[in-house]
Image (cartoon, rainbow, N blue to C red):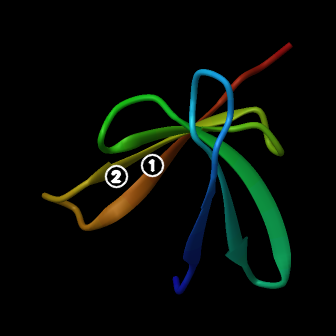
């Protein structure tokens, strides 16, 4: 998966949007390896051991 991160400033958290497969996802940094994807309402965490992102969707 190829993606690029673009940073902008917000009041408390840096807001990041990720360009992937032609769709823009707005995410917020939670920890060094974890983001909250506002677009999908999901938590994304990168695990170096598996070299991949794991997604945890929020169910209503």
**38 above or below 6?**
above
At horizontal 56% and vertical 78% (from top left) the residue drawn is 4
Which residue is located at x 57 percent, y 29 percent?
13
31 or 10: nearer the eye? 10
The mark tally for this picture is 2
Q: Which residue is mark 1?
A: 54
Q: Kindly indicate the quadrant of the structure image that contains residue 30.
A: top left
Q: Label 1 vs label 2: CA separation? A: 6 Å
Q: Which residue is depicted at the point 51% across and 40% down?
A: 35
Q: Quadrant of residue 7?
A: bottom right
**Residue lying at 53% horizontally and 86% vertically, measured from the top left:** 2
Q: Where does residue 59 sit, x and y in percent of width and height?
A: 78, 19
Mark number for residue 46?
Answer: 2
Q: Nearer the viewer, residue 50 or 32?
A: 32
Kindly indicate whether the residue at mark 2 contacts the one at mark 1 (C-beta within 8 angstroms): yes
Badge 1: how crowded within 10 Å, few (<14), some, or many (20+)?
some
Q: Earlier in the sequence, mark 1 or mark 2?
A: 2
């Amino acid at each position: 998966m190829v993606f690029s991160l673009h940073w902008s400033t917000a009041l408390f958290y840096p807001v990041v949007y990720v360009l992937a497969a032609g769709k823009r996802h707005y995410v917020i940094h939670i920890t060094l390896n974890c983001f909250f994807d506002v677009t999908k309402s999901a938590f994304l965490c990168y695990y170096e051991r598996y070299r991949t992102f794991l997604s945890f969707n929020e169910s209503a």
